[in-house]
Amino acid sequence: MSDTAKPPRLEVAGGQDRVFVDPASTEVDFQFDGKTVAVFDDMVERSVPMYGEIQRLTTELAGDFAVPGSRLYDLGCSTATTLLNLDATLPPGVAFVGIDNAPEMLAKARAKFAARGTHRDVQFIAADLQRDRVVEDASVVILLLTLQFIRPLNREHVIRRIYEGMREQSALILVEKIIVDNGMFNRLFIRHYYDMKRRNGYSESEIAHKREALENVLIPYRPDENVKLLRDAGFSQVEEFFRWYNFNGLVAVK
Ligand SMILES: C[S@@+](CC[C@H](N)C(=O)[O-])C[C@H]1O[C@@H](n2cnc3c(N)ncnc32)[C@H](O)[C@@H]1O
């Protein structure tokens, strides 16, 4: 086969996030489109505090609850970073399902899994969590930085539907950007968050442009609102396992 006849290669590694360098980037709301997908892994690493540690805690907790013969769901799986980490540690009998409503994310997730190679039963399914019932026979469900993008009006029924598809004694792992009630602490936490982004190489204008683009799209709740959401859906035990200023992680058991 000549070079010109080869199919285009999907870049698995991805590039550096420069999505918000351009001032015109604020003209539309933030989207998980091709431009974001191409740099997503770098974007997450540099924008989410302690992302590697969040991955490690999530992997450990998932290992505590995952049962061979059941399914583990990653809802809003993006490029499958979390599922790849889980694949390295969880028993092969746990089937993985990655769900996302961005087809370009799923294409990259599939390419990353193909590059790694696994004997596990893994599926990537395009679905909208606000509309579709996706969870069935789950021992673990993961929602990392995804519920914050679901319209507040829909969050209650999204969580209830997930609950209904989970086995008894199964766990939901929820990590979110959050706000707090106290205005002073909110300002301080957000200031320290932007300091972290500066340390990670984002410029003032990139930080400002992204903040503007996310304004109507990423709606953070207070931790107590997320706990209530989980308890109202029926989860009997809810515990915080991670906190960094304006980010937190909750684990809930059915
Ligand atoms: C911030 S990313 C999640 C990052 C990923 N979980 C991780 O830890 O690396 C949010 C993801 O949720 C997906 N998403 C947003 N709204 C969704 C919806 N209604 N249904 C399904 N996926 C959705 C986006 O396409 C995006 O890939």
Image: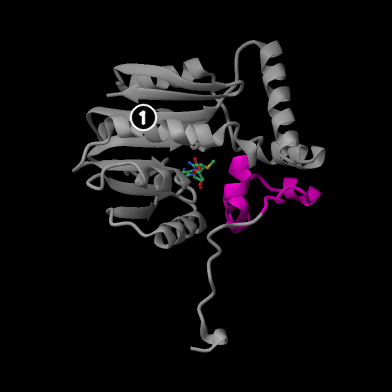
Q: Where's residue 218, x and y in %?
A: 59, 35
Q: Is residue 134 left or right of residue 241?
A: left
What residue is shown with label 1? 61
The answer to whether 104 is drawn above or below residue 151 in the figure is below
Quadrant of the snapshot with the C terminus: top left
Does residue 104 appear in the picture of this structure? yes
Does residue 159 appear in the picture of this structure? no
Q: Where's residue 49, x and y in %?
A: 60, 31
Q: Where's residue 105, x and y in %?
A: 50, 54
The residue nearer to you, when weighing 107 against 218, is 107
The residue positioned 60% from the left and 38% from the top of the image is: 217
Coloring applied to the structure: one colour
Determine the residue located farthest toward the bottom in the rendered image.
2
The residue positioned 31% from the left and 47% from the top of the image is: 96
Q: Quadrant of residue 70?
A: top left
Q: Is residue 34 magenta?
A: yes
Q: Where's residue 224, x and y in %?
A: 48, 15
Q: Amino acid at mark 1?
A: Leu
The answer to whether 94 is drawn above or below residue 215 in the figure is below
Determine whether the residue tagged by mark 1 lies in a helix, strand or loop: helix
The answer to whether 28 is drawn above or below residue 158 in the figure is below
The residue positioned 56% from the left and 63% from the top of the image is: 11
Determine the residue located farthest toward the left in the rendered image.
69
Q: Is residue 17 magenta?
A: yes
The answer to whether 64 is drawn above or below residue 85 in the figure is above
Q: Is residue 229 left or right of residue 8?
A: left
User: The magenta stretch spans which residues?
Assistant: 16-45
